[in-house]
Amino acid sequence: MPPPPDTLDLVPDQNAVAAALQWLEGIAERDAWPPKLGFGLSLSLDEALTNIVDYAFDDPAAAGSPPSVTLHCRQDETGIALEIVDNGRPHDPTKTPPPPLAATLDEAEIGGHGLRLMRHYLHDLRYARSGGSNRLTLVARAG
């Protein structure tokens, strides 16, 4: 029987991302994750949660009340699944096309490349909308 998931409830405000990253870092240290695995999940959580905090609740008519975000971290022998559940407005980031890559750094524009980085570090990225909540699952595997 797998262990119960680690869970963190957050208010989606300016402190949420820092609190979530500290929580995830504690799990990574406790369970001795390989550095690349911890880095990839932290970077991906930072990107996803920053976008949730900045955009999921910008239309109160489309968001749940009170605004909330819950993180669930499940581990087994195949890897780690970090689920981000929020009651913000519906949005499937997995359907967002990445912006084109610039030919040079001088031509590069800020923004829009977070999903590209997440897909680089994650084994899988899944989205579902159920029960009035967005569920974004970040799956990482060592190696």
Image (spheres, rainbow, N blue to C red):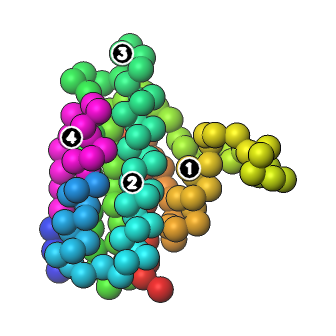
Image quadrant containing the N terminus: bottom left
Query: Picture quarter containing residue 141?
Result: bottom left
Question: Upstream in the sequence, badge 1 or badge 4?
Answer: 4
Horizontal side, residue 80 vs residue 119: left or right: left
Above/below status of 28 relative to 46: below
Q: Residue at 27% of width from left, 31% of height from top?
A: 13
Question: Upstream in the sequence, badge 2 or badge 1?
Answer: 2
Query: Picture quarter containing residue 65?
Result: top left
Question: How would you rate the neighbour count of disc 2 (Cα within 10 Å): few for under 14, some for 14-19, many for 20 or more?
Answer: many
Q: Which residue is mark 2?
A: 45
- In the image, what residue type sits under mark 3? Pro
Question: Upstream in the sequence, badge 3 or badge 4?
Answer: 4
Q: Which residue is mark 4?
A: 10
What secondary structure is found at the residue carrying circle 4? strand
Q: Which residue is mark 1?
A: 114
* Label of residue 132 in the image: none
Q: Which residue is mark 3?
A: 60
- In the image, what residue type sits under mark 2? Leu
Q: CA distance from mark 3 to mark 4?
A: 18 Å
Q: CA distance from mark 1 to mark 4?
A: 22 Å
The residue range painted magenta reads 6-20
